[in-house]
Amino acid sequence: MRRAAAIVMFHIVAMMAVGQIVTIKDEKINSDSIRDAFDKQPYFGLYKDNYFIFGPSLRHPDAKNTNIKFQISVAQKLTRSTLPFGTYLYLFYSQKCFWNVLENSMPMSDLNFNPGLGIAKPIFLRNRFMGKVARILEHEINGRDGDASRSWNKVSLAANILISPNANVHGKFWIPIVDGENNRDILRYSGIYQIGTQFMTPDRKFNGGVTLVKRKGWNLNYNVTVEAGMRMWKGANEYFFLQFYSGYGEGLLEYNKYHTQIRIGLQIKPSLFSDY
């Protein structure tokens, strides 16, 4: 039993490394075994990318728009084993901050809080782990009062599907519930859905990705994020990281102002592919 459990855990690690299940000779590894490994995975872990990056605006850079952006994102599994339909209940929390370190007193100009509660289901096909789908109820707020207050809610359907051992596509569609008095038009800037792709080299030394967020309207108006990372050393999940952002809605406070920004720094990634 211990040997079998060890083999299953080896396969879940292999799955996270290459995105699929590889059968070892003389051992039977099936979807039930992989689901059992999901049941026994750590309750607490990373959700979205965690990063700490610094850089200027590409449009008239100055001390105000050259800043640090950092994100902390974690997930807590709330159920010990599967719920009906093979799902798991999770609590999510992400926090994103814009820190103007070149200005006097170095103010944190915008701090966004994004808690959520969701049900996620891993997808298996012919003994391979193919990705996951999730239904998430999330709230985003900047914690300010008065005219600077911003908040909205989303009921989201998200999917993350492996198209090869080293690449995936992801999408997220949401039903918005805008409760902030000062951001009633937020869909025109922060969008109504997002799509993207991520890839890694076979040795996981390099990663990259593109995410497009569709703003409200019929024209091709997207907020664009392009990212690239290089692993710092073998076996680590820390990367030298570059992020380019062009569009609206990067932060809540200035959601309706256009930004073109490039930043570099440190990225900490989940074991497989990231959520968005």
Image (cartoon, grey):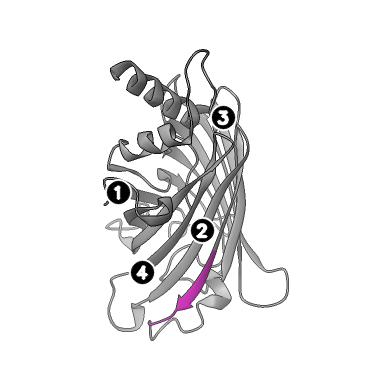
Asked which secondary structure carries label 3, the reply is: strand
Dot placed on the residue nearer the N-terminal end, 1 or 3: 1
Residues marked 2 and 1 touching at CB (< 8 Å): no
Q: Secondary structure at mark 2?
A: strand
* Magenta stretch in the rendered image: 173-179
In the picture of the structure, the residue carrying the numbered disc 4 is 139
Spatial CA span between label 1 and label 3? 29 Å
Circle 3 residues within 10 Å: few <14, some 14–19, many ≥20: some
Identify the mark nearer the N-term, 4 or 3. 4
Residue 122 as seen in the image, left or right of residue 91: right
Which structural element holds mark 1?
strand
Residue 31 spot, x, y in % from top left: 48, 36
Please name the amino acid that badge 4 sits on: His
Q: Earlier in the sequence, mark 1 or mark 4?
A: 1
In the rendered image, the quadrant that contains the N terminus is top left
Residue 273: percent from left, percent from top: 50, 40
Q: What label does residue 206 carry, if any?
A: 3
Residue 248's place in the image compared with 185, above or below, is above
Secondary structure, magenta segment, majority class = strand
**Mark number for residue 77?**
1
Cα–Cα gap, marks 2 and 1? 17 Å
The residue that disc 2 covers is 158
- Give, as a three-letter code, the residue at label 3: Phe
Q: Which badge, 2 or 1, is on the more N-terminal residue?
A: 1
- CB atoms at circles 2 and 4 under 8 Å apart? no
Question: Dot 4: what SS?
Answer: strand
In the drawing, does residue 227 fall left or right of residue 138? right
Q: Amino acid at mark 1?
A: Lys
Q: Give amino acid for label 2.
A: Ala
